Amino acid sequence: MMMKLGAPTQILPPMRFVDLRYPLSELTRDVIAGFYRSYDSFGFGFVEPVYRRVLSVELRQAGLHVESEVPFELFHLGESVGSYRADLIVERTLIVEVKTGPTLDSHAIPQLLNYLNVTKLPLGLLLFFGPTPKVRRVIRDDRREYPIPAP
């Protein structure tokens, strides 16, 4: 018999608050709300893929378009030098990186910034499912250029 974990969450109507000082504040507000609902249901102690899937369900239930583990190939001087997968891309605009563990790795924010610079997406959220939940907003650095091929 499989036991169901996680309390059912109530989908709340979207709030109308938008802060023009922050890019995509309405979208990030909805994603952050989904993060806290996910954290309230599952707490700390699972591996990242579980949290990524839980958050995907929360965001889709809230009416957001979510893509999981989206691959990106990295190029240098026209040659492929590697690839990475974004945990989640929400509304084709926002990269969401999910992290867990006893502490937030100091490399997580620079890593997300590199992902933003490569993809040219404007904003990312680092969501930490740790002993205490944490959210970090990361804005793309327009001064750095990374060549990637056009799709």
Image (spheres, rainbow, N blue to C red):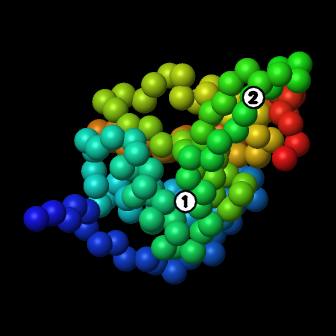
Q: Residue furthest front?
A: 79
Q: Residue at x 33, y 40 (%)?
A: 47
Q: Residue furthest bottom?
A: 13
Nearest the eye: 29 or 87: 87
Q: Residue at x 34, y 32 (%)?
A: 101
The residue beneath circle 1 is 31
Residue 41 percent coordinates (x, y): 29, 60
Residue 84 percent coordinates (x, y): 62, 33
Local crowd at mark 1 within 10 Å, few (<14), some, or many (≥20)? many
Report whether 118 appears left or right of 143. left
Q: Residue at x 39, y 58 (%)?
A: 54
The CA distance from mark 1 to mark 2 is 27 Å
What mark, if any, has residue 74 been given in the picture?
Answer: 2
Residue 89 percent coordinates (x, y): 63, 52
Report whether 101 appears left or right of 23. left
Indicate the amino acid at tag 1.
Val
Q: Earlier in the sequence, mark 1 or mark 2?
A: 1
Nearest the eye: 74 or 104: 74
Indicate the amino acid at tag 2.
Leu
Q: Residue at x 45, y 25 (%)?
A: 105
Local crowd at mark 2 within 10 Å, few (<14), some, or many (≥20)? some
Q: Nearer the viewer, mark 1 or mark 2?
A: 2
- Name the element at disc 2: strand
Residue 2 percent coordinates (x, y): 15, 63
- Which quarter of the rendered picture does the N terminus lie within? bottom left
